[in-house]
Image (cartoon, rainbow, N blue to C red):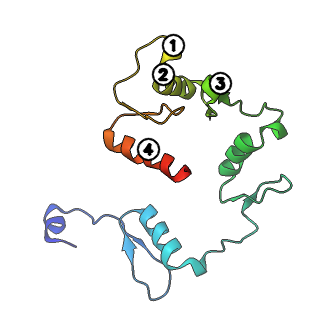
Amino acid sequence: MSAETETLGLEPPERHECSVAGCGKSYARKPDLKKHIVSTHPEILDLESSEKHECPITGCDKKYQEKKGLNKHIRQQHPETLGLEPHKRHECSINGCDKSYKAKSDLNKHIKQHHPETLGIEPPEGFICSVAGCGKRVKYKSNLVAHERTHMKDT
């Protein structure tokens, strides 16, 4: 106990001690103890236990420690099993662009940044790739130089 703690008559904060014989480590926060056990003493954890929550979809081998992780996985990766529509992708169809996004707002940002002329707005300031047919726009000249080098690899 520190002198300050004794003077104020306070109890020292609870410590979370490692239960592995001979280890002796202790932590002020329980999450730090859990991290210690996983990284230092994985042999005491039964990580291959049947208590893991396995995805029931044939061919999918995902496993989760918590049921909520499995539920999220099923909603996102196998929505049809719950009678939900698969996630719609929002595709950019401008100038043969093959980008697609889960969120329509991300597609809109992409169009504003990479195809502003289609919206009748001024392109954002920046640097435009000079390679024919590319037209990629970047914010910094150093990024443009790096980008244009990728075209040289193609030749």
Q: Secondary structure at mark 2?
A: helix
Q: Secondary structure at mark 1?
A: helix
Amino acid type indicated by mark 2: Lys
Query: Gap in Å between the C-alphas at discs 2 and 4?
Result: 22 Å
- Residue under label 2, please give it: 112
Mark 3: give few (<14), some (14-19) or many (20+) Cα within 10 Å.
few
| Mark 2 or 1, nearer chain start | 2
Return the x and y of residue 15 as percentages of the image width and height: 37, 69
- Residue under label 4, please give it: 148
Quadrant for the N terminus in the image: bottom left
Contact (CB < 8 A) between labels 1 and 4?
Answer: no
Q: Which disc, if any, is residue 119?
A: 1
Contact (CB < 8 A) between labels 2 and 1?
Answer: yes
Closer-to-camera residue (58/114)? 114
Query: Gap in Å between the C-alphas at discs 2 and 1?
Result: 7 Å
Contact (CB < 8 A) between labels 1 and 3?
Answer: no
Report whether 64 appears left or right of 105: right
Foreground label between 3 and 4: 4
| Mark 1 or 4, nearer chain start | 1
Amino acid type indicated by mark 4: Glu
Report whether 13 appears left or right of 116: left
Amino acid type indicated by mark 1: Leu
- Residue under label 3, please give it: 93
